[in-house]
Amino acid sequence: MKNFITKKYRVIYFKGIRLLMLSILLILTFQLFATSKLHVETQKDNLSWKIGIDSELINAGLNRIGNDVIFISGFEPVPIILAFTANPTIINAGDSTALTWELSNNATECIKSGDWSGTAAFTNGIHGETISNIMVDSTYQLQCSNNFGESRLISVQVSVINSGQPPILTLSANPTTVNSGGSSTITWTLANDATTCTKSGDWTGVFTGSAVTNGSHSLLVENITSNSTFNLVCVNSTGSSPSRTATVLVNNGSPNCANQPPILNGDEDFTIKLIPGVPFGQPGSPSDPATYDGTYDDIAPGSGWPGILGTASFFNLTSNKYIAMQFVTDNTNAIARLVFTTPGNGQGPPSTATTVAISECPGDFTTHLNQSRCLRVGGAVPNLRWSQNPNTNALTHCILEKNKIYYLNIVHSNSIADGYSTTGCTSTNCGGIFSHTDEQN
């Protein structure tokens, strides 16, 4: 037996030792490595050992010469990722981190995975890449290979602690249909560190503290006796989420509004509120409208439907948008006429066409309770007669049920043929004035 050095590995030349004996000798030798794992493969006239040292693999190649002579041709290592780091690992949303990796053992390819992709620099030494505009918690993975095998898959994580964005809010109800007196669980899910959430519609008040932490929250609403709408909007130091709505219907109540889609692709105007007497250009004037929450009470005088009879309500509606003011009828036999009058300078220019409808669904100008009198298509000043008295003639009045949710829908158009896309408002915004006249006998 002869010993000599090839490259940086010791090569042992054997003569006259059979293959089986050499295998046993090598197995015993490699037992000296506490972390080694030995695997023997036979392929035609070659043997190869894969030996793991410190969890990395190197290859030992055996060649046969004739029938009796075998020698070890050397060891070749698979790539090793010596280090893979991110700096910093905790950032604000939109910030960057620097990824750095160090390689040895002659990789021929490095593959990115997780929240980055493609190939990475693979030569021996230190490499780096900057990841920018990170908005959410991210994981970056790296694995390298050469002709002799693959390295371990290495990961680093980067956490985002401050979103720098308004809250992300989802809202849902389960179930969405109940029997009268039933219950539904309202669930809201938050991200981006909301500080408060404000309720409106059929629940009121403000959520704070543990109810606005990131994650999922829920509240059981009991004794639902009429169709109910639950609105929620959340804020943080950056801004506000969009207002979200969950609706719970009572059996034998409102139909599914998904079957009665709104006009104009649902482009509802929430900038309609005016404050009478406020100079043009100030909050509450047409160029800078006051905040409007989507309810009839927020526009009309007094409280509840129809408010104070004979008193005017003002609005300024954007061209090619609609209003859907939610209201709830009371328990009386009220009967009245909804009358529109020409707006003045304080409300904005008049429209040449205005349509008004009462429906169980927002933005619905098609079904309108399946009553012809619940839709009035007109010029600048239409009017609509309505009654909560079930004995009223439906040929003259729009009949409304008591203690029920409806929407007063208004659009500056009378073009039914094109879905009210052709507007009667020749300006960016047009004003409106309406009031209710008592028709009780």
Image (tube, rainbow, N blue to C red):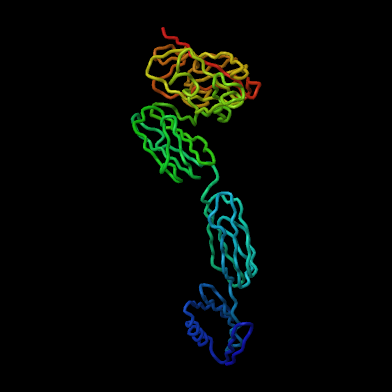
> Residue 345 in the image: x percent, y percent?
61, 17
- In the foreground, 12 or 192: 192
Residue 279, quarter of the rendered image: top right
Residue drawn 51% across the image and 84% down it: 26
Q: Is residue 56 above or below residue 399?
A: below
Q: How many marks?
A: 0
- In the foreground, 401 or 318: 318
Residue drawn 60% across the image and 83% down it: 9
Q: Is residue 213 above or below residue 77?
A: above
Residue drawn 64% across the image and 82% down it: 7
Residue 252, quarter of the rendered image: top left
Q: Quadrant of the N terminus?
A: bottom right
Q: Quadrant of the C terminus?
A: top left
Whether residue 200 sits left or right of residue 8 in the image: it is left
Residue at the limit of the structure toward the top, as seen here: 441
> Residue 44 in the image: x percent, y percent?
58, 79
Residue drawn 40% across the image and 26% down it: 253
On the question of residue 395 being in view, the answer is no
Q: Is residue 124 above or below residue 288?
A: below
> Residue 51 in the image: x percent, y percent?
53, 77
> Residue 431 in the image: x percent, y percent?
59, 19
On the question of residue 112 being in view, the answer is yes
- In the foreground, 284 or 393: 284
